Image: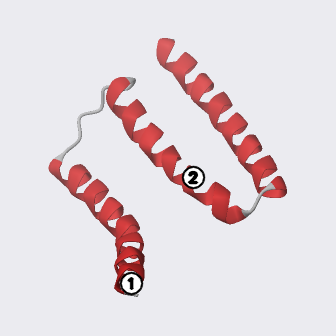
Amino acid sequence: MIDMGWFILSGLVHYCAQTVTSVAYKYEEASKIAPLSYTIGIFLFLSDIFIFEYHFSVTDILGVGMVIAFLLTPILYKMMYLYKK
């Protein structure tokens, strides 16, 4: 029964987050809001560890590392390009 409570709470929090994000996109530029979308993944990762006590396998960790690398590559490339100018 406790698991069902967490499931319902998770659904309500997700609904609120989507609603707030939709309103934010209505009133602000997407370039200012989009980076906040990446924090969702961080909170999901941390909730898996601390709330649901999920133990990640090696392939899970490699996948997370690949996603982080692919997200950081354009940022680092842009920083290096601007530094050369």
Residue 62: image location, x then y, percent = 21, 57
Residue type at the position of mark 2: Ser
Image vertical order of residue 59 relative to residue 66, above or below: above
Residue 22: image location, x then y, percent = 77, 51
| CA neighbours of label 2 inside 10 A, class few (<14), some (14 to 19), many (20+) | few
Residue 57: image location, x then y, percent = 19, 45
Residue 6: image location, x then y, percent = 53, 21
Q: Earlier in the sequence, mark 2 or mark 1?
A: 2
Q: Are marks 2 and 1 in contact (CB under 8 Å)?
A: no
**Can you identify the residue that label 1 sits on?**
81
Image vertical order of residue 73 relative to residue 14, above or below: below
Could you tell me which secondary element the residue under label 1 belongs to? helix
Return the mark for residue 37. 2
Name the side, left or right, on which 1 lies relative to 55. Answer: right
Could you tell me which secondary element the residue under label 2 belongs to? helix
Mark 2 or 1, closer to the camera: 1
Return the mark for residue 38. none
Q: Residue at x 38, y 40 (%)?
A: 45
Q: Residue at x 34, y 60 (%)?
A: 68
